[in-house]
Amino acid sequence: MNHSQQQPYTHVVELEVEQSKSYRIDLHEITRMPQASGYLWNDQMSLQMNCQGYASVMFMDPEPSKYSTAPNLEAQTFIQPETQYYAHYPGRFFYLKNLATGELISLPFAPCKVMPEVLTFSQQQQRLSWHVNHWGASFDLTVALADKDTLEVWQLDIVNDTEQPLQLSLISYFSVGYRSWMYQSGFYDDDSQALVCKAITPYQRLQDYKPDGQLKDITFCLSEKPPTSWCANQQAFEGDGHISAPQQCNQATLNNDLACYETPVAAMQFKLELAPKSNFSNRWLFGATTSVAELDKIRQAYLENEPSIASCGADIESRFELSGLDADIEAYANCWGSRQIRYLTDTNRLTTDPQTRNLVQDVLGLVYIDPDKAKRQMVMAMQQQRCNGEMPDGILLTDSAELKYINQVPHGDHSVWPLLWCQAYLDETNDVALLNEMLVFSDSSTKQPFWRHLELAIEHLLSQRDERGLSYIQQGDWCDPMNMVGPKGKGVSSWLTMATACALKSWCYIVEHYLEDYSPLKLNECHRLYGQINEAVNQHFWNGSWYARGITDNGRLFGVASEPEGQMYLNPQSWAMLSGAASSAKCFNLLYEVERRLNTPYGTMMLSPAYTSMVEDIGRLTQKYPGVAENGSVYNHASAFYAYALYQVGEHQHAYQALKRMLPKGADALIRGQLPNFIPNYYRGAYYQNPDYAGRSSHLVNTGTCAWVYRMLIEELCGLKGFRGRLVVSPKLPASVNQLSGKRQFAGATFNFTINRSSVQSVSLTMDGLAISGQQISDIQSGRRYQLNIEVPFE
């Protein structure tokens, strides 16, 4: 459908803030946004629920695993974008049959997809919920996760609001799926009132054998109330029908079918006779365990007592609050942004070997939420650095973890990120003691101070350059699939060269402001090398109106206007501004070209035009579908770099617009198909090539975007940035905003602030009624609350 033909947006999505400052997003018409989803997590698992009832769950065991899958053998892979939901996609469904009329519906919506009179899907901080009205009754369905266990906690409340009795057959249906080609089964355990589905994780090699009890190979569904009947066999449950109209739903009771190597399912029937104004309530626990003996403990903990549910980021007081912006950005600043950062850092993206760049940038966001945890994570990561200064491709989180998948491919950028993190951390905390903490290396027990680890990272980056001073790309830089530019050891990356300059710039900043007694001669040499790198960038990559992306092994400059596809890439333009390589004149030129070639209503594309066929000296990036992921999508991580760069060069109006486009809003949300509860990995790009598909969300929660966005809201938009224990105040309001207010915790104190435009000539500060000279607040007392009033001039 052409976007111009979309129906008007009318109260499809609502953002709510309750009195307790608990945030909620309501979706009232799920058929207009059928891909929309919400997510929950604890330290062991994550659950992403589609509004229709489809579920994507993953847990650590100790490697990523699933207890609910499709009814076919699934490939083991990382979380995929743009999930294609189909009838037998794993789900959590509740069939309801009206025994008086014979009508069959299902909650939340799939698989029957009969539209009830009222249906609302809600994302809350700790729960996902659905409210349904049908047959004169109300149905409230909620799910939360256990605080510690691999466990979903479901509850269904039914109220007969009519003056007539209501007879229902309720069948809860939890997908278990194809578990193992070695062993799978399903049966009902009377003692625990649970359907138990056993499996044995398949293996071939002797060294992969795991004795019973080591893996959570048992999927179970435990009911608070005993069911009337049950079925553990998916094929028998459907019979000659279909999942949207299973044969056993037409029977008086289920058949109590076992699964004996057939695909198991957890289906339970409850016969309900609801008198007028009466109600029914039941809870189900669905998850994974190592043994049936554990089920009694689980029942006692979660059904016989008030269950302890996962906080999903709601347990820590916000260190930053903001009021005065559009509702979607305000809600992201106050709730959904910090929540997304907490998800990424609590779960480590559900892997035991997160990519180094991912971990460090996720922890960058944590600097502004939980700096102590951020420090612990970075200390752990830096102790996996090699003696030569090289950071590994992935950070191992357990003793048994190994580098897998993409982390087995050499990338040249991982040593960049610790320098950028450290500058932000020191500015925010003034924790100079970190620089002198003694840390080991992955290949040596010899300890060196943290600052020396950073210096070695710089030395390694500088050593990985050619005779022109340009950085070797190896088999990729920040852009993983750019894997064929430099496998022969000659190809270079403009982005990585600029990022090396940025790392060197951060190192000079750290030395000058936080590291006493560092050699002035070495610092001068760093400044000289920084200037030299930027000169090399301009000599070899500036192509008249923008910066090229790189030079291949065979000496071909790419990312230039003379090519039919991939003429312009966003990252080199952003990082040329960040590194200082781009002069004011060059900034003017490249910003004009970005606006003309890359900007779309949904954000700034990563490159354009998108590739439509393989380019063998660039790599698998060019094989991705046009407008998807790195091949020309609105890749939000790259868009965040761009927005941050715009702030650094004084283009705060354009920077704010770039921030706004990362979140769905109004009718725009219908095109993107996503709620504003997280910023996704990407939106579809190739805007000028495939306009009817542009803007669609990937629905991937995993992204490095949110750390940079959260940082920008605090340090750039509000202009409340730390520096050596002082708070530097320099707001950068867009033209559309004349007033902001909020809260910012810094240096152990709380600043309640207001920002107002007025007739002042420059930024003016008063604190607790007293005028402040300049734009820095010093002598901050931990534990105090300050009232900071900021006036900024009209533009």
Image (spheres, rainbow, N blue to C red):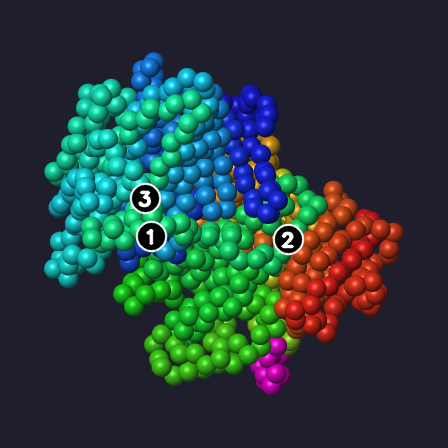
> Horizontal placement of 254 versus 432: left or right?
left
Of the residues shown, which amino acid type is indicated by label 1? Answer: Ala
Return the disc, 1 or 2, that comes first in the chain's sequence: 1
Number of numbered discs: 3
Span highlighted in magenta in the image: 514-525
Q: Residue 301: which numbered mark, if any?
A: 1
**Is residue 716 part of the magenta span, yes or no?**
no
x, y percent for residue 276: 42, 22
Count neighbours of disc 2 (C-alpha within 10 A) and say few if under 14, some if 14 to 19, many if 20 or more.
many
Q: What is the secondary structure assignment of the residue under circle 3?
A: strand
Can residue 570 be spotted in the picture? no
Q: Residue 321: which numbered mark, if any?
A: 2
Return the disc, 3 or 1, that comes first in the chain's sequence: 3
Question: In the image, what residue occupies the spot 66% across and 51% down?
Answer: 322
Of the residues shown, which amino acid type is indicated by label 2? Answer: Glu
Q: Quickly name the residue at label 3.
A: 285
Whole-number angstrom distance, CA of label 3 to CA of label 1: 11 Å
Q: What is the secondary structure assignment of the residue under circle 2?
A: strand
Asked whether 316 or 425 is in front, the reply is: 316
Question: In the image, what residue occupies the spot 19% across and 20% down?
Answer: 240
> Horizontal placement of 337 versus 394: left or right?
right
x, y percent for residue 453: 47, 76
Quarter assignment of residue 25: top right
